[in-house]
Image (spheres, helix red, strand yellow):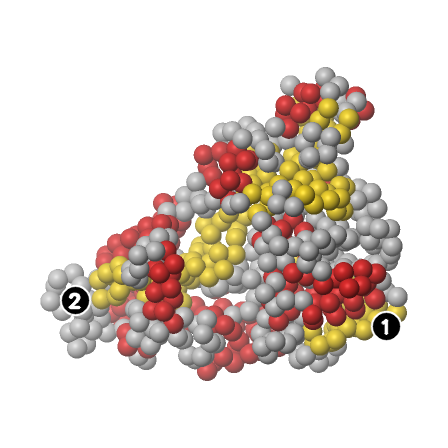
Amino acid sequence: MRRTAILMAMALTVLSMTGCSVEQDPSDIGEIQEGVDYFIFENAGISLPLTSFKTLNPLFIDNLSYYHFSKLIFEGLFEYDENLQPVPRLASTYTISEDGRTVEVYLRTDVLWHNGEPLDSEDVVFTVQAMKQSGEDSLYGKLVRSGAIEGDMNILSARALSENRVEITFREPTGNNLDMLTFPIIPDEIGNEALKVEDYSPIGTGPYRFVDHVKFKEVHLESNPQFREGEPQISYITGRIYDDRDLILTAFETGKLDMAPTIGVDWDKYEHNERIAIYEYVSGDHEVLSFNNQMEMFSLEGSELLRQAILYAIDRQSIIDKVYLQHGTQVDTPIHPSSYLASSEADMYGYNVERAESLLSSAGYADIDADGVLEDGQGNSLRIELLVNPLADLRLKAAEMIRTNLQEVGIQVDIAYPQGGTAEEIQENMENLLLEGEYHAALLQWGQSTIPSFEGFLGTGSPENLAHFSDENMDLILSEIATTWDENSKVRIFNSFQEYFVEKIPYGSLLFRNKALLVDSDITGPLQPTYYNLYNGLEDCYLTMSTN
């Protein structure tokens, strides 16, 4: 699409790339320098995908595509860096009180709202007050309520100390205090408009400012000339609204969009398409083998030897290569592999059949009747039912490979499926089996938040603890994680968590799935998509055209 538009521009015609017709003249094409094989195309735009959403108000976001899109408009006090560590964004510096309950934030003094007004501490206070009244179902509403008493927020209050200093108090000491300050800040001058859902007009501080919204069709943005880091080179962005991800991918393939997230794992088919650049990243989708710790084989003293043997016996790299087409990242713990909290010392379960067999022997299993299947001390065959959703194609293929791996070390595996005639019935029945503990082991996907919190996943009695794992030492570690805010102490306790996790193996951590953003190759620059910010770095990108 854009390549055609550029040729039109060279013919001094009209470019229409973002829904806003822009009259072109030769000055729109940057000067061609000797020895350079491309030039920068100025005063042009791109189109990004959206699915249907209910509001442009960032405090009520419940749509993932708009969540990523909105980061071009709005900014938080903090944002995540490439190591998943919250770093100042609208904040310049900060201090945390000795009890970990209060964060004093010093705001940047070079930030202007899109209407030209300066950012101040009253805007932060206003945003916190508005969030207290916003819905609990929004993405940011969940962020600031994570782990809190039902109906409450972790943030107790915010008050202005001066024009550029604000004090934010938390209900209790929390290890995720800076993570919770990544929500978008909105200006206090909008008043009651802050809680408006319909016809909300966004005003932010980000690199792009809102122009208009054609309902159910498009959202138009333009570059912010007052952005403190310089006006973006890409002048216009159109968010085009589609019914689903399949239509988005089709629109990208036919040139109607300039970027699109991939579906599935077969994006290598675009590798030789010169129009398409592929940006791969580690997603937050964590594939796990859940052991039902209520079952006798996984609950007896020393049963961690069986779980450890299972992990050694599974050739996860082969699963990544053959099932996920090399688009996965092997892990031994639930810590995201990009996180600064991830410890390389916790990576210990490489594929090792001999080690698996040795552990099984140490656990008291032997092939007494020489039939190829191990038995315990009472002569019971070591047999595991592996529960899988039959509609999850990749997980089903992984289950078949796991069955083959485990049978090679003497563990009989039967793949089991939840009953149901429709996808909804199958999913509901699977959830019931997991919640009621009526399974041996199960292949699951856990969608991980950017906040490193594992109390729901592992805490004794938590309804999200589908492994039904109960361990006092783990509960103490999780409690310390929840309240440790000092960075040095935080790294220490997370190291302890990972060491204990790989010892006890409440879940078999298999891999994090990789995903990719497909991008028109004319977009050049430091684009670094992540699962928490798909368009990370877009404000520093520009459009180019080859001179060859």
The quarter holding residue 296 reads bottom left
414 or 198: nearer the eye? 198
The quarter of the displayed image where residue 124 is located: bottom right
Between disc 2 and disc 1, the foreground one is 1
Q: Residue at x 77, y 41 (%)?
A: 223
Would you say the residues marked 2 and 1 are in contact, meaning their CB atoms lie under 8 Å apart? no
Q: Amino acid at mark 1?
A: Leu
Confirm whether residue 477 shows in the render. Answer: yes
Dot 1 surroundings within 10 Å: few (below 14), some, or many (20 or more)?
A: some
Q: Is residue 386 left or right of residue 221?
A: left
- Where, quadrant-wise, is the N terminus in this rendering? top right
Instruction: Please name the residue that numbered disc 1 is placed on.
Output: 161
For the residues labelled 2 and 1, the Cα–Cα distance comes to 72 Å
Query: Is disc 1 placed on a helix, strand or loop?
Result: strand
> Percent x, y for residue 21?
73, 30
The x, y position of residue 395, in whole percent, is: 36, 53
Per the rendering, the mark at residue 441 is none
Residue 451 percent location from the top left of the image? 59, 65
Above or below, 457 relative to 395: below
Residue at the disc numbered 2: 367
Name the outermost residue toward the left. Answer: 369
User: Going by the image, does 155 lie left or right of 491?
Assistant: right
- Report helix, strand or loop for mark 2: loop
Q: Residue at x 26, y 54 (%)?
A: 404
Indicate the amino acid at tag 2. Asp
Quarter of the image for residue 367 reads: bottom left
